Image: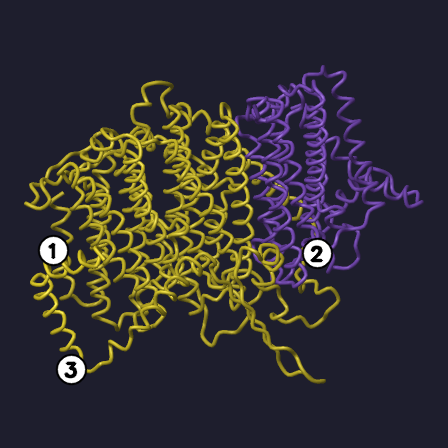
């Protein structure tokens, strides 16, 4: 553990003195060695040897307990994998910015701090240390996001993120300080003992406060508003890491709180389920209408957090109803989907980064036909897109299948209220799947297929093959989880045991049950792949004999088609956006065609986030206009400011002096 | 195994019957019921033309689409005889594997860079998305009613006893029939015989497919009809012995094909903008089934 921190801080001191190449390699070396160190320990934790370590700590914090249990292990492995691949990818992605020496130094340092703090967050068991690490994580994430700080939008997005992360810390602080105030200890165990001793409302409020804090980080709706700005603003490798890992630390926080807070799990489950349903549906609904590829992906993160949340919700309900299988199905689904989402979403962001690198454009409607210029990127994007839609034979299906099984298992002995919850949750999950298909056929179809919608004044070509290595590695994992999920389910055994707590020894052990459920699914997936290969072979065999020729696309009789008459992203989703109009807030700018020989028209639509408008923008505007009334106080004249200072000092000194008189005065008034 | 053979046989004549009914009711004699299969066989023998805009996606999409339908077929049981693959939650696999096929169908349409095919792709993506919730709620209701979560066990345990369950079976038939209309892009959602690309949904997506690939797509469509027909049959046969259930299978399949033919002959296609409402109705009906299931189990007490 000490080595872990030493490497990080040593490197931070070293990096400013290296040249650009050296900086990059140093950052990668540090991330890799730290990942190997922590990953090794995490693997041990996953196989049953959890690790305890006590730092003596300081006077303020008390002894700092570090515990690397199976849950931390699972998350640390995810963090390490995404950071190593993301860092390797970033080495090449950042080549274009080589000249900005100082900027890169800061970026590298913040990157290492981010990795170190994220891994530490998984093991720290002391609330003050946890908050400090959380703050380091939030600040370093802010620094890596605003790499392109010469752009106004980037700084704005960064500020938005920074402010919201601190609102998040506020909620966490409230929870931690409350417990510390009541028990006098900052250790996480104190939370357990406190909530166990005070059943009822206390535990619930405590949990809700933590949930809100972590939900801001995870991006649950309505706490998501920072997310769609921060992801597109950051460089591609950071967006991938952010969506893959940083928001997952919020999920980790929620899961950790479930293990240490003893409260009414059934109600907690319902609360989480409600938030998750809304997040899942609303996230994908907004994702579809986005014009910016990275913003689209960012809204999809919200959707996937919703799916993970559904798993957690089922798990909690299982805990609340003492149903071990239900709890393990829910938590296993949630944990596996966390891994899956980290994989396919980072892959999507990295490939979007490739697109940006090649075209300097992320506007979906202006791209097209990239599959010819960038075949590898297109293939990788396709794999990730199928995975994120939850379609077999890739990994997204496995975790969604477990969550579905959870819902249908819960159905067996549910009463009316629960049954309605189940059926609407299933409805939502199905709709999410369908909408995701709509969204990713749009994203893939418009960006990569067809012909280029506008010419670029520079050569568009595939990124270097080294840059593709980490992406293919991620794609490999996506396929392996889809085709051989058993390997990963065995890794889930201990984390799920930890979450289901003392229910575990009641009934059947977990792995047999879930592996039982998934065995036939795996077989079917294999069968499916076999059928595809067979049909493909047959096609090869038969087509070999027939003639095959190439000709232009059928233009329905029109002989001079141009790239501009292709279907665009906006027209692809138009039937959808008409249908979902009540939920979307859209504005149109239209220039009518006029005259006998019209010259040019224009039509633009922008979609806004309704929740963001009513929950964030409008209240802020109201507060701003209220505070604006006092703007005369801030008039920029030094004399006035000195006057305010004097008035303040005088009142501070005088009010205690005259306190008695003032009290007397009020008593007098009351008597009248 | 039995279900596989039966579905394959039904797939051979299902579309033929629809076409025959349509031509008879419009006063023509019409082709014989094996004509669609002959079409497919001759397509298999033909060479193909590929658009110069297309990429590998266009090459693999029909294969994957066909394979997804075959895979879905393997899951469907026949009464007390299991499908080749049967497990808890197999209906989830059924729906999702079909959606893989749809995914590839849609992107292969986009691959041609044609303005018309993109339009069809957009409509297909939207409509099939709305058909899925109805299917999942229907299956959820059956799961609730029987306590099982695999096609085979659910259908085997389904007993038609009371009036309410008759009503449910009929509503279920309606939902499955309508889903199969949406999935196969038939009337009243889509008109397969329309002559104008602007009004097509499915047909316009496959404008550029030819030869073996087109044959695969067409035969996948025939099989899809038979698969949904088989699901409808399963609602009724339960544990009947084979000497009754196999004739019932064919009777119901023929009835369904005739019904579809009649619907197509006497109904106009809906306006495109009304389709979404129609599909919402489907979801509502399936919710009705769910409440019916609750009623039977006395959960309202």
Q: Quadrant of residue B78?
A: top right
Q: Are marks 1 and 2 on the same chain?
A: no
At 46% from the left and 51% from the top, the residue drawn is A283
Instruction: Give x and y (percent) for residue A580.
Output: 58, 54
Out of A619 and A478, give the one closest to the viewer. A619
Q: Nearer the viewer, residue B85 or A240?
A: A240
* Mark 2 residue crowding within 10 angstroms, few (<14) / some (14–19) / many (20+): some
Q: Residues within 10 Å of mark 1 (few under 14, many from 20)?
A: few
> What colour denotes chain A?
yellow
Res A540 visible: no
- Tell us which disc is closer to us: 3 or 1: 3
What shade has chain B been given?
purple
Badge 3 is on which residue? A639
Q: Is residue B122 shown left or right of residue A34?
A: right
Between disc 3 and disc 2, the foreground one is: 3
The N terminus of chain A lies in quadrant: top left
- The chain under label 2 reads B
In the rendered view, would you say A149 is above or below B78?
below
């Amino acid at each position: 553990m000490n080595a872990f921190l030493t490497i990080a801080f040593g490197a931070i001191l070293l990096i400013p003195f290296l040249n650009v190449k050296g900086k990059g390699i140093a950052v990668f070396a540090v991330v890799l060695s730290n990942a190997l160190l922590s990953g090794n320990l995490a693997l041990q934790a996953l196989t049953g040897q959890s690790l305890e370590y006590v730092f003596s700590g300081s006077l303020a914090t008390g002894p700092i307990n570090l515990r690397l249990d199976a849950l931390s292990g699972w998350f640390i492995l995810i963090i390490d994998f995404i950071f190593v691949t993301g860092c390797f990818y970033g080495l090449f992605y950042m080549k274009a910015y080589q000249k900005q020496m100082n900027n890169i130094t800061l970026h590298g340092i913040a990157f290492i701090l981010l990795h170190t703090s994220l891994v530490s967050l998984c093991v720290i068991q002391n609330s003050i240390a946890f908050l400090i690490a959380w703050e380091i994580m939030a600040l370093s994430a802010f620094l890596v996001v605003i790499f392109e700080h010469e752009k106004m939008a980037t700084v704005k997005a960064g500020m938005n993120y920074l402010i919201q992360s601190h609102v998040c810390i506020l909620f966490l602080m409230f929870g931690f300080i409350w417990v510390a105030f009541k028990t006098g200890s900052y250790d996480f165990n104190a939370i357990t003992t406190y909530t166990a001793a005070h059943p009822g409302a206390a535990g619930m409020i405590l949990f809700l406060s933590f949930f809100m804090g972590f939900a801001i980080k995870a991006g649950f709706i309505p706490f998501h508003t920072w997310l769609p700005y921060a992801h597109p603003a950051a460089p591609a490798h950071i967006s991938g890491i952010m969506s893959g890992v940083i928001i997952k630390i919020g999920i980790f926080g929620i899961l950790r709180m479930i293990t240490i807070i003893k409260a009414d799990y059934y109600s907690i489950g319902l609360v989480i389920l409600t938030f998750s349903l809304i997040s899942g549906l609303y996230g994908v609904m907004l994702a579809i209408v986005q014009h910016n590829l990275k913003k689209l992906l960012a809204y999809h993160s919200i959707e996937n957090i919703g799916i993970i949340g559904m798993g957690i919700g089922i798990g909690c309900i299982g805990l609340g109803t003492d149903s071990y299988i239900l709890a393990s199905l829910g938590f296993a689904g949630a944990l596996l989907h966390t891994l899956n989402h980290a994989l396919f979403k980072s892959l999507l962001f990295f490939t979007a980064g490739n697109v940006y690198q090649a075209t300097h454009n992320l506007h979906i409607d202006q791209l097209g036909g990239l599959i010819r210029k960038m075949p590898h990127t297109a293939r990788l994007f396709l794999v990730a897109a199928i995975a994120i839609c939850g379609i077999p034979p890739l990994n997204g299906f496995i975790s969604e299948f477990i969550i579905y099984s959870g819902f249908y298992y819960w159905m067996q002995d549910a009463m009316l209220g629960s049954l309605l919850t189940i059926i609407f949750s299933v409805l939502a999950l199905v709709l999410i799947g369908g909408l995701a298909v709509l969204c990713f056929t749009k994203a893939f179809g418009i960006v990569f297929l067809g012909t280029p919608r506008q010419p670029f004044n520079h050569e568009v070509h595939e990124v270097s093959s080294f840059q593709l290595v980490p992406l293919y590695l991620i794609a490999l994992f996506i396929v392996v989880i889809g085709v051989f999920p058993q390997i990963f389910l065995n890794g889930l055994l201990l984390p799920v045991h930890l979450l289901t707590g003392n229910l575990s020894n009641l009934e059947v052990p977990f792995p047999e049950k879930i592996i039982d459920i998934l065995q036939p699914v795996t077989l079917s997936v294999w069968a499916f792949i076999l059928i595809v290969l067979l049909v493909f072979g047959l096609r090869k065999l038969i087509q070999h004999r027939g003639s095959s020729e190439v000709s232009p696309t059928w233009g329905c009789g029109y002989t001079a088609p141009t790239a501009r008459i292709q279907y665009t992203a906006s027209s692809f989703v138009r039937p959808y956006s008409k249908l979902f109009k009540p939920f979307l807030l859209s504005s149109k700018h239209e220039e009518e065609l006029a005259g006998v020989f019209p010259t040019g028209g224009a039509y633009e639509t922008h979609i806004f986030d309704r929740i963001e408008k009513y929950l964030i923008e409008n209240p802020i505007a109201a507060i701003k206009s209220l505070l604006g009334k006092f703007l005369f106080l801030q008039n920029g004249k030094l004399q006035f400011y000195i006057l305010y200072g004097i008035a303040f000092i005088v009142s501070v000194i005088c009010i205690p002096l005259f306190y008695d008189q003032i009290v007397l005065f009020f008593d007098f008034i009351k008597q009248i | 195994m039995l279900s596989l053979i039966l579905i394959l046989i039904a797939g051979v004549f299902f579309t033929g019957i629809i076409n025959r009914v349509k031509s008879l009711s419009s006063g023509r004699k019409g082709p014989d019921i094996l004509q669609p299969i002959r079409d497919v066989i001759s397509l298999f023998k033909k060479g193909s033309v590929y658009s110069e805009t297309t990429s590998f996606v266009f090459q693999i999409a029909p294969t994957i689409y066909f394979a997804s339908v075959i895979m879905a077929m393997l899951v469907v049981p026949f009464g007390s005889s299991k499908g080749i693959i049967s497990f808890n939650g197999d209906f989830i696999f059924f729906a999702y594997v079909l959606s893989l096929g749809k995914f590839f169908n849609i992107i292969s349409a986009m691959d041609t860079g044609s303005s018309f095919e993109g339009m069809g792709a957009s409509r297909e993506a939207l409509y099939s998305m709305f058909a899925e919730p109805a299917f999942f709620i229907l299956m959820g209701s059956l799961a609730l009613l029987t306590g099982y979560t695999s096609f085979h066990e659910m259908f085997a345990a389904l007993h038609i006893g009371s009036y309410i369950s008759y009503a449910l079976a009929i509503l279920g038939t309606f939902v499955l029939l309508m889903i199969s209309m949406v999935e196969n892009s038939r009337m009243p959602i889509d008109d397969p015989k329309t002559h104008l690309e602007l009004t097509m949904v499915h047909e316009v997506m496959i404008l550029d497919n030819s030869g073996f690939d087109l044959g695969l797509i067409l035969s996948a469509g025939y099989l899809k009809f038979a698969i949904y027909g088989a699901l409808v049959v399963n609602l009724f046969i339960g544990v009947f012995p084979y000497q009754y259930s196999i004739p019932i299978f064919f009777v119901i399949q023929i009835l369904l094909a005739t019904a579809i033919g009649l619907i197509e002959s006497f109904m106009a296609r809906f306006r495109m903008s009304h389709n979404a409402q129609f599909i919402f109705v489907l979801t509502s009906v399936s919710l009705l089934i769910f409440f019916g299931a609750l009623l039977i189990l006395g959960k309202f007490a």
